[in-house]
């Protein structure tokens, strides 16, 4: 979903659900013992992206954009090595014409 607050200022939210079975890849515990014939994950991702463009009033750079991206991932798995939760944050800017 995208929300346009003003020209050059917007936010996007997203949700992704993904179920994976890894045929031929067994699920193992921390000791290497078999816990499942096939590794199975069910990943969930939630994201927020916000961007704001600023015009400089000069020829170059004509504008720059500031952005903030955030993603939360949860990956339950029957294999403990792939069972994780994490947060990813990216703050930056880009320069353009």
Image (tube, rainbow, N blue to C red):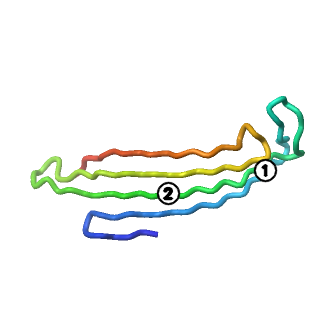
Circle number at residue 84: none
Q: Is residue 67 above or below residue 4?
A: above
Label 1 Cα crowd, 10 Å radius (few <14 / some 14-19 / many 20+): many
Q: Residue furthest top?
A: 31
Task: Specify whether 21 is left or right of 60.
Answer: right
**Image position of 63 (left or right of 5):** left
Which residue is rendered at x = 85% and y = 30% of the image? 32
Say the numbered circle drawn on residue 40: 1
Please give left or right for residue 38 compared with residue 93 in the image.
right
In the rendered image, residue 76, in percent from the top left (x then y), is placed at 71, 50
The residue located at (20%, 53%) in the rendering is 63
Q: Residues within 10 Å of mark 2 (few under 14, many from 20)?
A: some
Q: Are marks 1 and 2 in contact (CB under 8 Å)?
A: no
| Distance (Cα) linking label 1 and label 2 | 23 Å
Q: Quadrant of residue 51?
A: bottom left
The residue that disc 2 covers is 47
Q: Is residue 29 above or below residue 69?
A: above
**Residue closest to the far left:** 58
In the image, what residue occupies the spot 73% across and 37% down?
A: 81
Label 1 sits on a secondary structure element that is strand
User: Percent x, y for residue 1?
Assistant: 46, 69
> Foreground: 76 or 62?
76
Q: Secondary structure at mark 2?
A: strand
Taking depth in this image into account, of 81 and 96 the one nearest to the observer is: 81
In-image side of 49 versus 46 (left or right): left
* Dot 1 or dot 2, earlier in sequence: 1
User: At which x and y percent is residue 49?
Assistant: 41, 57
What count of labels does the image hold? 2
Between 16 and 58, which is closer to the camera in this rendering? 16
Percent coordinates x, y for residue 34 in the rendering: 89, 37
Which residue is pictured at 63% across the width and 51% down the height?
74
């Amino acid at each position: 979903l995208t929300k346009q607050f003003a020209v050059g200022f917007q936010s996007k939210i997203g949700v992704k659900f993904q179920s994976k079975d890894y045929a031929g890849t067994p699920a193992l515990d921390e000791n290497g013992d078999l816990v499942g014939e096939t590794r199975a994950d069910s990943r969930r991702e939630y994201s927020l992206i916000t961007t704001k463009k600023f015009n400089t009033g000069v020829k170059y750079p004509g504008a720059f954009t500031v952005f903030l991206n955030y993603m939360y991932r949860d990956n339950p798995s029957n294999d403990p090595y792939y069972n994780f939760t994490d947060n990813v944050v990216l703050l930056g800017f880009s320069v353009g014409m």
